[in-house]
Amino acid sequence: MALIVQKYGGTSVGTPERIANVAQRVAKFKMLGHQVVVVVSAMSGETNRLVALAKEVQPNPDSREMDVLLSTGEQVTIALLSMALMELGLKARSYTGSQVKIVTDNAHTKARILDIEEQNIRADLDAGYVVVVAGFQGVDEKGNITTLGRGGSDTTGVALAAALKADECQIYTDVDGVYTTDPRVVPEARRLKTITFEEMLEMASLGSKVLQIRSVEFAGKYKVKLRVLSSFDDEGEGTLITFEEEDNMEQAIISGIAFNRDEAKITVLGVPDRPGIAYQILGPVGEANIDVDMIIQNVGADGTTDFTFTVHRNEFKKALEVLKGVQSHIGAREISGDDRIAKVSVIGVGMRSHAGIASTMFRTLAEEGINIQMISTSEIKISVVIDEKYMELAVRVLHKAFGLEQGA
Ligand code: ASP
Ligand code: MG
């Protein structure tokens, strides 16, 4: 007998028929003698509908009330799924986040889980119930309803699996696993049987939307065995997220190509090349709560240097304004920006032990005449910033150059 946490996303519970299908799958695991905890998202489109509704009433919605509103989406699905399970003759019981007591901090709309009281769930499981828990929500120490950020049901699933020391956390979604890259861009993309946590973390933070990034961090930290599967396919084994030390010699060098268009680039030209200049430029940006991703400073010549960095595209205008405000103070000759850029990254833990990945990447891009504007590297990733209009081409040629396609 195993204890399994299954999380179903919005499309998997998008209609009453689909909810009935989920109940069937849960029943199958129950019949095999397992204990099952199910975490569900709101029905597809519901959270967006609620967000839009709120904005019609209050253009900049109060965040506490937003959480009260958004948490209703998941409350609907836990009740419906419990009913569907009962229809199959199973014992089932639903819990909202605050009923479980998924305790979070009080950062409304992006709260973090601090603690989970798992005694009630355990007692129900021992009494033969399927326990159905609302994803994405918790409660702060004062009893206020909180939510965990968009996509947060993944994190609920993983956190519950960690708290219950579950044997496996299965994330059911509308794709059948994690791919070498987005199949919409590269039809030859291949499903990965396994991927390491670190790689998955990079994939998630670089734009792959399969799992909420925080859930991956959580799973890595608490060593939760995590699997991504399709809820529309009964046969597939999905993708297992593994820990590197368990891995064998067959570890691929490169696991995937990630990309995103969410960034914009800002260049500060002709600043004095002296100690403190990076701080003078990025200090005000940080104070405005704008996250900076890649940073490049040129080697100084004739006493001045240039400084380039990227921010989220939504914060591009704000970052430009902040810098224009301090331009004369920092003594910059010019400040310019470009929000038509894209970031493309090659990811793989095998890079640690293989040289030449960067040169293959750069040669491949050069052969297509794609200019690299910025480069950043880590132990398991190389990212480049390029003109947005070459993004798909870059992803395709890199996918091929690293032999990631099906049957390769
Ligand atoms: N319903 C929430 C959302 O759409 C949480 C989730 O689905 O994970 O973001
Ligand atoms: Mg989701």
Image (cartoon, rainbow, N blue to C red):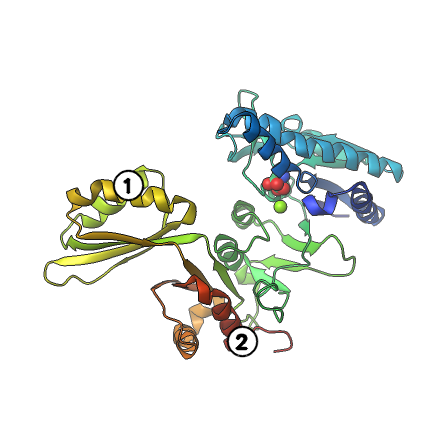
Q: Secondary structure at mark 2?
A: helix
* Depth check, front residue: 68 or 251: 68
User: Residue 367 placed where, x, y %?
Assistant: 42, 79
* Depth check, front residue: 130 or 126: 130
* Depth check, front residue: 126 or 311: 311
Q: Residues within 10 Å of mark 1 (few under 14, many from 20)?
A: some
Of marks 2 and 1, the one in the foreground: 1
Quarter of the picture for ligand 1? Answer: top right
Judge from the rendering whether residue 104 lies leftward or rightward of residue 372; answer left or right.
right
What residue lies at 80% left-to-right and 40% top-to-bottom?
A: 16
What residue lies at 81% left-to-right and 43% top-to-bottom?
A: 23
Q: Secondary structure at mark 1?
A: helix
Residue reaching furthest to the front: 56
User: Residue 339 placed where, x, y %?
Assistant: 39, 54
Residue at which label 1 appears? 322
Q: In this rendering, is residue 137 above or below 304?
A: above
Where residue 127 sits, quadrant-wise, is: top right
Total numbered labels: 2
What residue lies at 63% left-to-right and 74% top-to-bottom?
A: 406
Where residue 80 sits, quadrant-wise, is: top right
Decide which of tag 2 and tag 1 comes sooner along the chain: 1
Residue at which label 2 appears? 400
- Give the Cα distance between marks 2 and 1: 41 Å
User: Residue 358 placed where, x, y %?
Assistant: 39, 72
User: Residue 226 placed where, x, y %?
Assistant: 63, 52
Q: In this rendering, is residue 298 above or below 66?
A: below
Q: Residues within 10 Å of mark 2 (few under 14, many from 20)?
A: some
- Residue flagged by tag 2: what amino acid is it? Lys
Judge from the rendering whether residue 265 lies leftward or rightward of residue 95; answer left or right.
left
Q: Which mark is residue 257?
A: none
- Residue flagged by tag 1: what amino acid is it? Val
